Image (tube, helix red, strand yellow):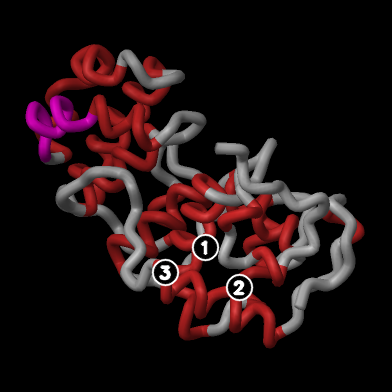
Amino acid sequence: MARGSSAASDNVDAMNKTDIETLFSRLRAANPNPRSELQYHNAFELLVAVVLSAQATDASVNKATPALFAAAPTPQAMAALGEDGVAPYIRTIGLYRTKAKNVAALSRILIEQYGGQVPGTREALEALPGVGRKTANVVLNIAFGQPTLAVDTHIFRVANRLGLAKGKTPLDVEAKLMKVVPEAYLHDAHHWLILHGRYVCKARSPDCWRCALADLCPHQPKTARPAA
């Protein structure tokens, strides 16, 4: 059962192993095959989509990328478009000028250094323009099947709110999650936690009344079902 009752993450007791197992077994039962909500067809499109999603919603990225990927489905085609050619396709996405520059630049690097393929190591990915640890973790997990955890604002909030992995920085939360998430759930853990934070355990008003984890969660006060 839940430990403690404070809503402040610093005062939330750490979740025990039994509750962690229960938490992930419930998330898996509700969504056995979780997937990223970004739309892509290959590792290159995934990489570009994740770069574009920084400080933007997946929905906004998905509105822009079909036309972009139709025009430039490969690093070669994207590099040929260049920054000025990419920009009009992603104008509706925040920071689009910087992102257009990064997408064009990383495409050139993929051609020059990796034969047009997306590299499968953290070091190589993080050396690409616009790619940080979170982006690298997403690509490594989805494209290469590695058990990584990409800690975004949703995972950061959910991990702290539940007492699953308390930390003051995304890197701290990531390190703790890697230690406490059972191996059987590790590959899909970041998908489950992101989706849970996006649609149920929301920042301002979590939907506690429909949360499958409510009995494991110390967050108070619990939100009630809205009036009909």
Identify the residue at image location x=82%, y=53%.
220
Q: Position of residue 48 (x, y in %)?
A: 29, 39
Residue under pointer 1: 149
Q: Are marks 2 and 3 in contact (CB under 8 Å)?
A: no
Q: In the image, residue 7 lies at what x, y percent? A: 84, 52
**Residue shown at the point (34%, 53%) measured from the top left:** 36
> Which corner quadrant of the image does residue 139 belong to?
bottom left
User: Label 2 sits on what residue type?
Assistant: Met
Residue at left offset 86%, top offset 51%: 8
Is residue 69 located in the magenta-colored stretch of the structure? yes
Badges 1 and 2: C-beta atoms under 8 Å apart? yes
> Which mark, by number, is residue 178?
2
All told, the count of numbered labels is: 3
Instruction: Find residue 30 and name its label.
Output: 3
Residue at the (28%, 61%) spot, across then down: 143
Q: Secondary structure at mark 1?
A: loop
| Amino acid at the residue labelled 1 | Leu
Q: Position of residue 121 (x, y in %)?
A: 39, 63
Q: Which residues are magenta?
A: 65-73
Q: Measuring from the top left, give residue 202's x and y in whole percent.
A: 61, 43
Q: Amino acid at mark 3?
A: Ala
